[in-house]
Image (cartoon, grey):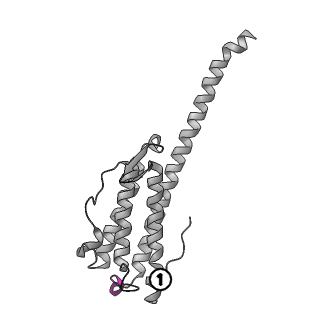
Amino acid sequence: MKKFIYQLPGVFILLLLTLNANAQLTSEALKANMIKDWERAKIYTTEYIDAMPEDGINFKATPEVRSFAEQFLHLTNGTVWLISNGTGATSTYAGKDLEKLPEYKASKAALLKVVLDGYDYAISAIKGLNTKKYAEKFKSGQMETERINWINKAFEHQTHHRGQTTIYLRLKGVTPPAEKLF
């Protein structure tokens, strides 16, 4: 019985190491899946922008809503801000309201470049994030949540705004790109 009791700390330590290794694998798998999803979203967004005719870049479905380009510029601003909060990476567009900058609405090529730069920023920042920081809280203004939640909100935000542009394409007589779940 004494031998068993003396072995308990070793068994307990082994169990803790195994649990920690599994948690790390889970964190790394989560990170890999996030990167994969962001890369897929980048391709999907490219297809949306490519589908819009050049003369539709500044098209508005109604006068009071954002134009097609402004939706994607807003998407990019949101992605960079939320990912910056989630990862701690330096924001590439800090203090810039991309929606208000005419150079990004001048052509489809200019729009696509800035939007893809935003996706590249997100992917790079997530790749550089230490998975041990997922649960770390970060506060911006009145909002405070774990870093992983900031990243999830960024993905939700870009999905929402890309989805809004479906009607813009349809109003221009274009069939939107097929859904890309995987």
Q: What is the span of residues highlighted in magenta in the rendered image? A: 53-58
Foreground of the two, 69 or 28: 69
The residue tagged with tag 1: helix, strand or loop?
helix
Image location of residue 84, percent across then percent down: 36, 53
**Residue annotated with mark 1:** 167
- State left or right for residue 151 relative to residue 20: left
Residue 31, above or below 1: below
Image location of residue 159, percent across then percent down: 47, 68
Kindly give the residue lying farthest to the right in the view shown.
1
Q: Quadrant of residue 18?
A: top right
Residue drawn 34% across the image and 77% down it: 69
Say if residue 122 shows up in the picture: yes
Classify the position of the N terminus by image quarter: top right
Classify the position of the C terminus by image quarter: bottom right
Image location of residue 153, percent across then percent down: 46, 59
Residue drawn 35% across the image and 59% down it: 80
State yes or no: residue 50 in magenta: no
Image location of residue 97, percent across then percent down: 28, 67
Say if residue 119 shows up in the picture: no
Amino acid type shown at disc 1: Ile
Q: Quadrant of residue 63?
A: bottom left
